[in-house]
Amino acid sequence: MEVVVRKMQQRVRKAREETERWDDLNSRLLSQFSNAAAIITRLLVLGDAKNHGILRCVPNIREDLLGAQMRSLELIFVSMRETLEEFSGIAKGLSKVLRDANQMVRGGLALTGKQLQLQVGILPTIADCLGGLQTLSEMHQAEYALKSSIISLLTWKSSSSEIAAMRQLLVDQPNIPKDEVQSVFDIIFADEIC
């Protein structure tokens, strides 16, 4: 039984690596979002000719400035979509780790319910490992769906209050409570903490 638990811990270790990568990607997405928000805010100012001062006499200044900002904004939108693809890869990777663990336990080893609940010393039960992987997978799937929705709603027409609300959701990551994630790892890796 200990060997099976150790194999499960290896799968959870892989999931933990993915969640660490997720945090790095979230920092990148927040930076990209902030850059896009700054440009969107700037577009309103640049669109008003009275804000150009002495530069109003330069031919096509308004159009040139707006065009440059729109090109920059489009590049940021492309970067955000690429970052979302990486989030999607992590969410899919976590689902695969869970599927593989379930397959190993239910298909390959055909363990009974009692065996899943059996605890060897300080090691977690197999059910703890499966439950932890399930929780991590569901959290990240839900958070990916939220991030994808938020980014799809961001346009050059978004208001400052909409942008602020979207940014707050991205920062908070409401579907991934840090204490719950840590609790999953604490249970599964209790033998390493001691």
Image: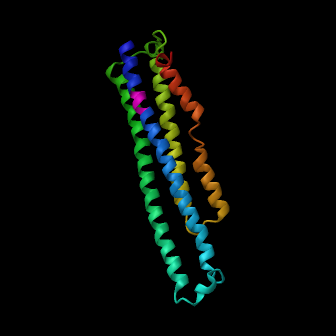
> Is any atom of residue 1 visible in this view?
no
**Can see residue 123?**
yes
| Above or below, 112 relative to 155 | above
Q: Is residue 157 above or below residue 124?
A: below
Please give the range of residues in magenta: 11-15
Q: Relative to residue 94, is residue 33 depicted above or below?
A: below
In which quadrant will I find the N terminus?
A: top left
The residue positioned farthest toward the front in the image shown: 54
Number of residue marks: 0
On screen, residue 33 versus residue 89, left or right, reads: right
Residue 18, image x, y percentages:
43, 37
Q: Is residue 96 above or below residue 147?
A: above
| Residue 124 x, y percent position in the rendering | 48, 17
Is the stretch drawn in magenta largely helix, strand or loop? helix
Horizontal placement of 22 versus 169: left or right?
Answer: left
The residue closer to the viewer here, 136 or 26, is: 26
| Residue 156, position as x, y percentages in the image | 56, 68
Quadrant for residue 9, please give it.
Answer: top left
Residue at 48% across / 15% down in the picture?
A: 117
**Magenta region includes residue 14:** yes
- Residue at (53% x, 43% y) in the render: 142
For residue 25: magenta?
no
Q: Position of residue 88 (x, y in %)?
A: 43, 47
Q: Nearer the viewer, residue 40 or 2?
A: 40
